[in-house]
Amino acid sequence: MDTYGKGIFKGLMVTAKHFFDSYLDDIKWWGKRYYTPEGLAHRSSKDAKGIFTVQYPEEKVPVPEEFRYIPFLVYDESETGEKTIRCTSCGICAKACPPQCIWIVRGSDPNTGRPVPQPAEFTIDADICMNCGFCAEYCPFDAIKMDHDYEIASYGRNLLNKEALMKPAKYYAEIRPLNNAREEAARAEKAATKAAKA
Amino acid sequence: MTTPAPITTQFDLAEKFPGTVSADARPGYAGWIVAPEKLTEVAIFIRDELGYDLLSSVTGVDYLAEGLMEIVYHVYKTSGGPALVFKAQLPRLDPVKVASLTPVWLGAELQEREIWDLYGIHFENHPDLRRILMWEGFDGHPMRKDWKEAFYDDEVKPFKSRWPEGKHAFAEDRSPFGDNVSFEAGFDPEKWTATDPEEALYATLKKYKTVVKDGIATDHILVNMGPQHPSTHGVFRAVVMLDGENVVSLKPVMGYLHRNHEKIGERNTFLQNMPYTDRLDYFNSMSNNWPYAMAVEKMMGIQVTERAEYIRVIMAELSRIQNHMILIGMLMNDLGAYFTPALYAFEERELILDIFEAASGSRMMCNYHRFGGVVRDVPAEALQKLKDLVFERLPGKIDEFDRLLSENEIFVSRLKGIGYLSPEDAIRTSMTGPMLRASGIPYDIRRADPYSVYDRFDFNVAVRYNGDLYDRYLIRIDEMRESIKILEQALRQMPEGPVMSVKPTYQVKVPAGEAYGRIESPKGELGFYVVSNGKPNPYRYHVRAPSFINLTSLEMTCVNEKIADFVAILGAVDIVLGELDR
């Protein structure tokens, strides 16, 4: 090293570049860099420079389709407004769940006492849930899916019962359009082969 | 760098030691069973005559039904090649005793302490056989099969209480104490007086000799760094004996974040362990899944599809880049250059995590690997972003880090010549990963014992020869550049096709046997030793955590350095407490 401080100077050039870049980028994206979707997209792209900070909660990074948070139960709504839950209480999600936070009471016919494909109770202890997504992944009825809503902080414990877990199929199609389309197609195909056999 | 030829034929130990060593004949098992009384003799032969100089993993298995305790050793050659596995079987009678192998491989020190703690196997002649993860005074040895935890629900998951009569109840309501504490019958915590649990710990430190100079007698100072200390990256504690500012002796104290990951792992089904592995080294969940999947795939005898192999490589290398960036940033924090480098590192990490999130659904707890492949293909949009990053952004950013720090005189003078670890000591203490390579040993599992598709890539094993902190910093920069090389090749070569070779199922059938899967994780060798007895749950699930074993050399590197340098030395080891304490 010939001159002491050359390395420090070289390093400072990098910080100086970052410093000026933050202003240059602000000017280049004048008025559009913050609080707009395209500004946010720019700040999380390969060309991002300058200030990275996202002003949460005023602006939020859009979550990708596969983003997973607490599970919810999908219900289909008929034209008359009747809600039918897709869950058949087969228990696969409860068996696959790594922290064992899903509790299901299988429904039974009040007259005969025989099990019916409906959950009488469905509880998820969301404080224990580790957001792994296995329940949604292995559900054969597309009945349980992972939500995108991550703002669930509360003063109490997040013990979710069936009513709290139920969300319409429309909502599911909205947050996961590609997955939903794929599943719809698979279901339609299945129904078609079933009809062909019958 | 030349690739060492794989060693395919193994030396016949049974022939060399008739009556002492026999081949492990159980179906699904491999390796040698050594008579416990001759263990040291055989180990010295393995090390000196056969050249297996690196002790990778030591672990215990409790075969309750057979009445046996087994200790499993995995040793490797730093010149490359597959493992030599040998085992010692001990009758399961208290006290279970066996000779310690610390005189042969010093790297056994922490691992044998862990086995003593969790299995109650007594290692004779161990220099410091104390509990390591549990606290002094803990009752019992929790990894034994007949030990049950406080919130015990059922022997294995899925718990029967969840379905079909799954009436929810909080675990603490079921425990008679209202929390996760259980006492022996007749034990009253109010009346109990503790013997000082720290006494044994302090007794292990080397004492400082009082020196009288100019009529002034100096004395030692005992300093507890942590567990709540900003330099320790979590709840890690080091007890340091100081002579003025110089470190005389040091003992790491750990276990503050211990949750008995391995016991949980044995209660889980094979698949259920996958998201738990994410929580070990939470910076690198993408590469944590991998060795576990690899171990189970070995037992199941299934192949991974080509595309999935490439995706795994890409994710693991991205994970390495962001890990090393954060490490450098945090090391700068430790040295007092607050947050500028750390936040520059976080910018790149954010971009990489965006890709992880798009592919796996989560930024940090990825849970991406499955047995036979990965859960889903990388979405097209994320793949494009990944290519943009790898080809356009990251190489420049790594150079920027290099410019920012590598020649900085203050930085260099804080790191050069500090924390020296000789190559011999590095091997002896079972260092792996950048710690070992910075000491001049070009041992990288990706090259030494190639797994997945790493044999198809052209890259160099980063190696530095001075063994000091500066080299441990430089090697991270080197490794990031090599990772970029691998990524570029992988992205060009990646074939189209399915990402799962088998039908996805939550109940995998794993034949009885054992397997050890290991990868070159950013922190070192991350290995999973899994034993199956054919049931849906692993019989044994052991994590060979690089953060943990790389601390074996901590005292060695810190002695005679200044206390302020301890912070930097610890920072450069690259520990993550989630993995260290398990």
Image (cartoon, coloured by chain):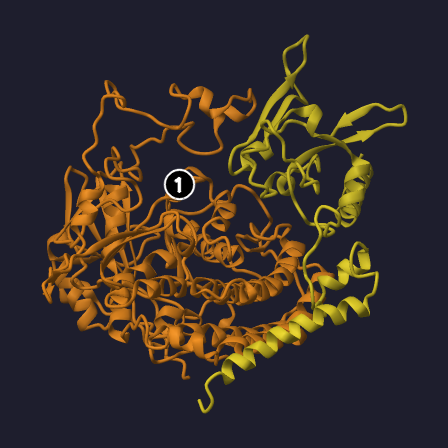
Chain painted orange: B
Give the residue at mark 1: B259
- Which residue is most to the top? A111
Q: Residues within 10 Å of mark 1 (few under 14, many from 20)?
A: some
Residue B514 pos. (x, y %): 36, 52
Residue A29 occupies quadrant = bottom right
- The amino acid pointed to by label 1 is Arg
State which quarter of the image contains the N terminus of chain B: bottom left
Q: Is residue B77 above or below residue B498?
A: below
Task: Compare residues A89 and B523 and report the one nearer the observer.
Answer: B523
Residue B129 appears anywhere in the view: no
Q: Is residue B66 left or right of residue B354?
A: left
Residue sitting at 83 percent across and 65 percent down? Answer: A30
Residue at 90% across, 27% down? A79
Q: Quadrant of residue B51?
A: bottom left
Please, is residue B389 above or below residue B283 in the view?
below
Instruction: Specify the colour of chain A.
Output: yellow
Which of B380 and A188 lies nearest the eye of the viewer? Answer: B380
Camera-nearest residue between B581 and B244: B244
Residue A100 drawn at (x, y percent): 52, 33
